[in-house]
């Protein structure tokens, strides 16, 4: 169709002529963040080639350009159809950064303008197999977001005043390196790297180790530490890796299929299994899309899950339906019998165990299990969980029939929601143990078996330091740092921070008790310098001293591997414009030269910063950043990965050579490498050259390397006993000696029905489910995603709605223990009576209309410090359409962008796992009055500290409970472990006694 006719038609139809879309350029451009991209046209016609076809087990088929054409690919521009306009691309693989799954992406980079046309799936990626969720392709929105940060910024006004100046990278490097050098010379706990989305495996940890500081802080305690410690106590791995595709039964405690951890890679395999006849069981008080796809939906009262799981365990034990040979072979049942008196008061059984001594038989352990779980009848489980008994029986049958093929998963959900949530993960994995589904085909493995992390060229030694702000003595068993308590610990005068890096992390918005974070971030005595490394504006970056723009998925280097299935792979995230430029013979020194504006990447930033911190090498830092190929010279990012791919990835050099490529060229071409196709039951692997000693363990080179099983040297598990630990000696040794801590057992949640009186207007607020199209705090810069999901109403059952007298769309006021918020209500039978639920990723805000978060995704708010620790947030304006270089911003049709509920959540640090227990007791839920407005939030931070002290009082500190004078068990995980010496409890340690008046509070 000619442009003339098209224009005529367009004017008759009153739409914009299509030719306006045809933005064409014949030279290189770089418009990310400033304009919509322009693409070149080519006279070359698309070839007829055989496409790479992926036939999915559910019958669908996807096609991709064949890999030998990726360097030079021509296709019609589908957006201009029916016009036939050919575009010429170089296709560059990278890895998605919009959740933790690291799915493969393929960027279509224009060969002339070097603009990115789209991101599609990478068919050769073994985890994602060509497929993505909506968030993968939305990477394109993030690159061309008109409100992205393009240059390094330094604040010029007061912190939080919103006044910034553009600076050079050189200035940022110099000023920040100076502060770090000064700090490091004084102390080893003054620099803190607080990471939200890591999106890489080990790079930054190596950097922090090189600085010699205890500097790693993570978001894990608001995410997954509850589940992690539950798994770790069993087997010495802290994440499950279910082999969904081959499962007979899939048991999920979460909305896993729709938003789970390893979302797209797992979802596609769960559906594969379902197509092959697997049964899906889902525990969730909310009728999620996952629950609706399940064979059995068990809408448990939050916190009661362990009751239900252990009733299934009892059913299998009582009826001899469990895999007895497996349990006898791999569970520490002999050790459990030695401690039977800690688990039962049954005198007869104890007598018989005692008289049997070392020759006690497995039958006695069977009896012990029967005794421990005697109360866990289906009837009692139905009562506790408020689920019909028939549904529990049905689920029990499916689990019992799984025969070594039970794929199970819990990650956030109940494990992070409840006090004692870690025992829910432990009870869940008990079913894997009983069914013999541990690392089997169709079973559930450990993450470390299905994840491959290659070693870099030189590893700095462990540091000798301990930052009390990361792991205070009160939580000796916390799995990862007590990160969300940082403001509370600072307010107690437990320390301060010289240089605080937040990295893809928005602590004030994502953590509970955000106004405590507001106070901390404003306090220049406690947080002396705040550097926000972020691809997008966020609420916390507003209170930074430096805001440094870092790249999205197609703008940075990283290596990632995830346990998506029973194999191992590594993916190579790449800055796609840089790679395309280099393919075209245009050299790039630093990635910010190729990215939009001066957006950089952390890899190069950390190298340059660390080198500047120690320019003459006298601090011992520079040596870790010198090239292994050019002695004395600072390493390049190419050299860093070149060394890893040449030396640390088994099989890669050989495969690359077959194609006439170097290992680095291979990874740049394909973006991924499959290290092991299948990896089942590695604990059964023999220990080569291992010696079985008299103590029953296997040693190699004088180090513990395995365990003897029937006289054979086996690798075993990563626990002190090298077995699966039903009885946990660690729990008992560290002062948690009661039965409910040492074996899989339910703990009473803080939101148990006994604690919630519905007749008084109290309810349970479930605030921790996520919508499948949201990217934590980076969604706001992805317009396609925000158009799909932008509101987080309060889900409420019709029974409760009738009691309260509200209808869908009415405003409700939800009162928590520290404040309240006002939101609209959505009446649905998809939530359990007595429970209200609210998605946790919405309610973004900005303080200034014209700068900060996207105008289509955030409220303009008035943040009022009312004095005496009281804060209020009032919404002045919702989302609006606005004119920008992107025509889509003028098409914003929605106003509501949700309510920031996390501000009103008190902190609930679990006394064992340290996880923030997200579920909240809503003290009152009622219809809002006329003067209570949508989005309004009010909080009393004095109450925040009281709640913190209430939870602090539940702990059993290392000072009173450490069996060996150490701060925590050395075998438990830390992202960066110091030397054992640093674990010693200081002799002058003085653990704070809870009071209602924190030190330093007026
Ligand atoms: S599942 Fe995660 S990694 Fe995969 S495409 Fe979606 S957001 Fe990206």
Image (cartoon, helix red, strand yellow):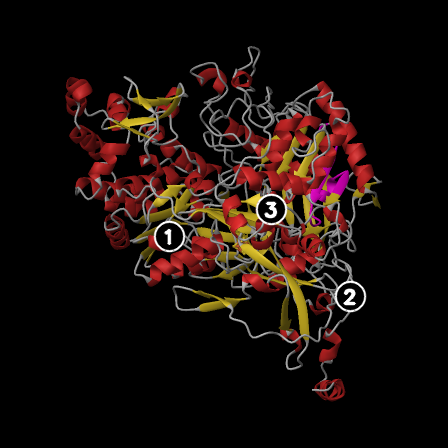
Residue 630 in which image quadrant? top right
- The alpha-carbon separation of the residues under discs 3 and 1 comes to 32 Å
Q: Nearer the viewer, mark 3 or mark 1?
A: 3
The spot of residue 332 in percent (x, y) is 28, 28
> What secondary structure is found at the residue carrying circle 2?
loop
Classify the position of the C terminus by image quarter.
Answer: top right
Q: Quadrant of ligand 1?
A: bottom right
Q: Bounds of the magenta span?
A: 526-547
**CA distance for labels 2 and 3:** 43 Å
Q: Dot 1 surroundings within 10 Å: few (below 14), some, or many (20 or more)?
A: many
Residue identifier under label 2? 883
In this rendering, the answer to whether 344 lies above or below 318 is: above
Q: Earlier in the sequence, mark 3 or mark 1?
A: 1
Mark 3 highlights which residue? 664
Q: Find out whether the residues at labels 2 and 1 contact each other: C-beta distance under 8 Å.
A: no
**Numbered tag placed on residue 15 in the rendering:** none
Q: What residue appears at the point 47 percent right and 51 percent down from the top-left corner?
A: 260
Between 357 and 684, the residue placed more toward the observer is: 684
Q: Are marks 3 and 1 in contact (CB under 8 Å)?
A: no
Q: CA distance from mark 2 to mark 1?
A: 47 Å
Note whether residue 91 is visible.
yes
> Which element is circle 1 on?
helix
**Residue 750 picture location, percent across and down:** 44, 38
Q: Residues within 10 Å of mark 2 (few under 14, many from 20)?
A: few
Task: Decide whether residue 813 is among the magenta residues.
Answer: no
Reading the image, the residue beneath label 1 is 244
Q: Is residue 502 left or right of residue 401?
A: right
Name the image quarter holding the N terminus: bottom right
Image location (x, y in percent) of residue 773:
55, 58
Q: Is residue 541 rendered magenta in the image?
A: yes
Count of labels in the image: 3
């Amino acid at each position: 169709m000619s442009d003339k006719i098209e224009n005529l038609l367009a004017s008759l139809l009153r739409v914009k002529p299509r030719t306006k879309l045809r933005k064409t350029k014949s030279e290189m451009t770089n418009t990310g963040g400033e304009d919509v991209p322009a693409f070149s046209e080519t006279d070359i016609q698309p070839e007829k080639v055989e496409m790479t076809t992926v036939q999915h087990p559910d019958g669908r088929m996807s096609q991709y350009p064949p890999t030998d054409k990726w360097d030079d690919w021509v296709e019609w521009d589908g957006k201009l159809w029916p016009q036939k306009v050919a575009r010429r691309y170089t296709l560059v693989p990278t890895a998605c950064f919009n959740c933790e799954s690291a799915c493969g992406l393929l960027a279509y980079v224009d060969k002339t303008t070097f603009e990115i046309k789209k991101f599609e799936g990478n068919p050769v990626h073994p985890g994602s197999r060509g497929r993505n969720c909506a968030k993968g392709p939305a990477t394109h929105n993030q690159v061309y977001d008109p409100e992205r940060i393009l240059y390094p910024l330094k604040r010029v006004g007061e912190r939080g005043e919103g006044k910034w100046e553009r600076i050079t990278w050189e200035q940022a490097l110099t000023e920040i390196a100076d502060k770090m050098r000064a700090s490091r010379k004084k102390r080893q706990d003054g620099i803190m790297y607080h990471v939200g989305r890591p999106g890489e495996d080990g790079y930054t940890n190596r950097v922090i180790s090189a600085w010699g500081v205890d500097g790693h802080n993570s978001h894990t305690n608001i995410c997954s530490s509850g589940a992690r410690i539950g798994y770790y106590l069993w087997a010495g791995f802290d994440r499950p890796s279910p082999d969904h595709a081959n499962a007979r039964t899939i048991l999920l405690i979460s909305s896993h299929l729709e938003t789970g951890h390893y979302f797209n890679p797992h979802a596609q395999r769960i559906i594969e299994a379902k197509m092959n006849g697997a049964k899906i069981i889902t525990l969730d008080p909310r009728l999620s899309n996952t629950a609706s796809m399940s064979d059995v939906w068990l809408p448990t009262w939050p916190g009661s899950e362990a009751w239900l799981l252990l009733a299934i365990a009892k059913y299998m034990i009582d009826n001899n339906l469990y895999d007895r040979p497996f349990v006898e072979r791999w569970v520490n049942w002999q050790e459990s019998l030695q401690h039977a008196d800690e688990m039962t008061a049954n005198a007869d059984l104890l007598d018989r165990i005692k008289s049997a001594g070392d020759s006690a038989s497995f039958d006695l352990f069977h009896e012990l299990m029967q005794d421990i779980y005697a109360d866990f009848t289906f009837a009692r489980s139905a009562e506790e969980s408020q689920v019909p008994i028939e549904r529990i029986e049905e689920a029990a049958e499916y689990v019992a029939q799984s025969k070594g093929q039970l794929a199970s998963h819990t990650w956030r959900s109940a494990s992070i929601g409840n006090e004692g949530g870690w025992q829910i993960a432990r009870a869940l994995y008990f079913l894997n143990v009983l069914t013999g589904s541990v690392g089997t085909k169709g079973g559930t493995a450990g993450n470390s078996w299905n994840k491959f992390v290659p070693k870099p060229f030189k590893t700095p030694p462990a540091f000798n330091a301990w930052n009390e702000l990361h792991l205070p003595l009160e939580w000796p068993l916390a799995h990862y740092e007590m990160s969300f308590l940082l403001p509370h610990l600072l307010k107690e005068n437990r320390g301060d921070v010289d240089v605080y890096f937040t990295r893809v992390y928005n602590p004030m918005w994502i953590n509970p008790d955000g106004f405590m974070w507001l106070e901390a971030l404003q306090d220049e005595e406690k947080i002396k310098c705040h550097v926000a490394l972020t691809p997008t504006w966020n609420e916390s970056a507003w209170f930074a001293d430096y805001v440094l723009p870092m790249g999205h998925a197609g703008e940075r280097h990283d290596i990632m591997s995830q346990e998506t299935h029973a194999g191992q792979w590594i993916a190579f995230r790449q800055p796609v414009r840089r790679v395309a430029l280099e393919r075209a013979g245009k050299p790039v020194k630093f990635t910010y030269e190729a990215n939009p504006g001066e957006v950089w990447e952390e890899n190069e930033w950390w190298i340059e910063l660390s080198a500047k911190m120690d320019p003459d090498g006298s601090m011992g830092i520079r040596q870790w950043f010198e090239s292994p190929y050019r002695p004395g010279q600072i390493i390049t990012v190419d050299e860093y990965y070149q060394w890893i791919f040449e030396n640390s990835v088994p099989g890669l050099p050989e495969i690359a050579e077959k194609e006439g490529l170097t290992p680095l060229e291979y990874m740049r071409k394909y973006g991924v490498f499959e290290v092991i196709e299948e990896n089942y039951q590695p604990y059964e692997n023999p220990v080569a050259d291992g010696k079985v000693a008299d103590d029953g363990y296997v040693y190699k080179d004088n180090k513990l390397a395995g365990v003897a099983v029937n006289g054979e040297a086996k690798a075993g598990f990563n626990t002190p006993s090298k077995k699966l630990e039903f009885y946990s000696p660690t729990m008992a040794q560290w002062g948690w000696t009661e039965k409910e801590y040492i074996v899989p057992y339910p703990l009473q949640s803080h939101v148990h029905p006994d604690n919630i009186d519905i007749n008084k207007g109290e309810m349970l607020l479930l605030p921790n489910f996520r919508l499948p199209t949201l990217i934590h705090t980076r969604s706001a810069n992805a317009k396609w995603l925000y158009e799909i999901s932008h509101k987080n109403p309060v889900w409420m059952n019709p029974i409760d709605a009738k009691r309260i007298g509200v209808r869908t769309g009415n405003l409700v006021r939800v009162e928590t223990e520290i404040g309240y918020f006002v939101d609209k209500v959505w009446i649905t039978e998809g939530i359990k009576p007595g429970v209200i639920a609210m998605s946790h990723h919405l309610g973004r805000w900005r303080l200034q209309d014209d700068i900060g978060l996207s105008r289509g995704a955030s409220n303009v708010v008035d943040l009022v410090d009312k004095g005496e620790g009281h804060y209020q947030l009032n919404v002045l304006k919702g989302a609006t359409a606005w004119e920008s270089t992107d025509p889509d911003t003028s098409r914003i049709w929605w106003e509501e962008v949700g309510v920031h509920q996390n501000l009103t959540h008190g902190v609930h640090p679990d006394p064992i796992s340290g996880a923030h227990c997200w579920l909240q007791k809503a003290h009152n839920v009622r219809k809002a009055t006329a003067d209570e407005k949508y989005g309004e939030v009010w909080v009393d931070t004095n109450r925040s500290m009281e709640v913190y002290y209430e939870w602090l009082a539940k702990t059993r500190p290392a000072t009173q409970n450490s069996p060996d004078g150490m701060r925590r068990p050395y075998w438990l995980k830390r992202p960066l472990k110091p030397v054992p010496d640093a674990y010693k409890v200081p002799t002058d340690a003085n653990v704070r006694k809870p009071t209602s008046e924190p030190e330093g509070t007026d």
